[in-house]
Image (tube, rainbow, N blue to C red):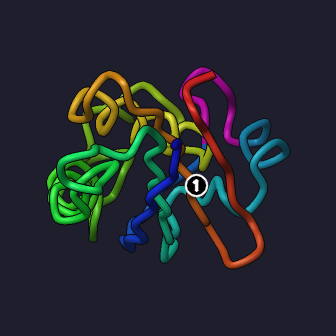
């Protein structure tokens, strides 16, 4: 039997969408108000889903406490109340769009899981805008 286990998390972070090699005008044309030089913030909602077989001994796909700890260490501690462009190494040269944030989270969490498990990251930038990434 294959089952998916999910855990919700939350973090607040600021960012600015822009490319250093573009003019301020082009950044404003492409990214609009999200290119504010003074940054802007979001209350991100995150759903981390792990899919795999149920362990016959434990009845778990993954111990939810282990998943909680991984999310806290790899995402919440790293991103919460941070300016992503300035304080998070992964975004020094990577535009912190919702898409890129989801991929970075995936790449931080996946190595912490058993290799037989699949991972999906769903990141809500607003209640109506979200991205999903599963390593493909």
Say which residue label 1 marks.
Answer: 122
Q: For the C terminus, which image quadrant?
A: top right
**Residue ID at (30%, 39%):** 109
* Residue closest to the eye, 69 or 58: 58
Q: Position of residue 74 (x, y in %)?
A: 22, 48
Residue 13 vs residue 135: left or right?
A: left
Badge 1 local density, few (<14 within 10 Å), some, or many (20+)? many
**Residue ID at (60%, 21%):** 21
* In magenta stretch: residue 21: yes
Q: Position of residue 93 (x, y in %)?
A: 42, 25
Number of numbered discs overlaid on the protein picture: 1
Quadrant hosting residue 129? bottom right
Q: Residue furthest front?
A: 56
Q: Residue furthest right?
A: 29
Q: Is residue 122 above or below residue 14?
A: above
* Residue closest to the eye, 40 or 7: 7
Q: Is residue 70 above or below residue 104?
A: below
Residue 53 vs residue 20: left or right?
A: left
* Residue closest to the eye, 26 or 72: 72
**Residue ID at (28%, 56%):** 59
Residue 68 vs residue 21: left or right?
A: left
Q: Is residue 29 above or below residue 21?
A: below
* Residue closest to the eye, 57 or 82: 57
Q: Position of residue 58 (x, y in %)?
A: 19, 54
Instruction: Give SS at disc 1.
Output: strand
**Residue ID at (52%, 68%):** 40
Q: Which residues are magenta?
A: 18-24
Q: Main secondary structure of the magenta part?
A: loop
């Amino acid at each position: 039997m294959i089952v998916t286990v999910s855990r919700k998390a939350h973090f607040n972070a600021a960012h600015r969408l822009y490319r250093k090699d573009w003019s301020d005008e082009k950044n404003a044309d492409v990214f609009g108000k999200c290119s504010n030089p003074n940054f802007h913030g979001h209350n991100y909602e995150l759903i981390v889903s792990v899919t795999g077989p149920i362990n016959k001994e434990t009845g778990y796909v993954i111990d939810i406490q282990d998943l909680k700890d991984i999310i806290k260490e790899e995402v919440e501690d790293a991103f919460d109340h941070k300016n992503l462009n300035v304080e998070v190494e992964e975004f020094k040269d990577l535009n912190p769009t919702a898409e890129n944030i989801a991929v970075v989270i995936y790449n931080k969490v996946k190595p912490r899981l058993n290799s037989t498990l699949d991972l999906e990251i769903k990141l809500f930038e607003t209640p109506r805008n979200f991205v999903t990434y599963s390593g493909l």
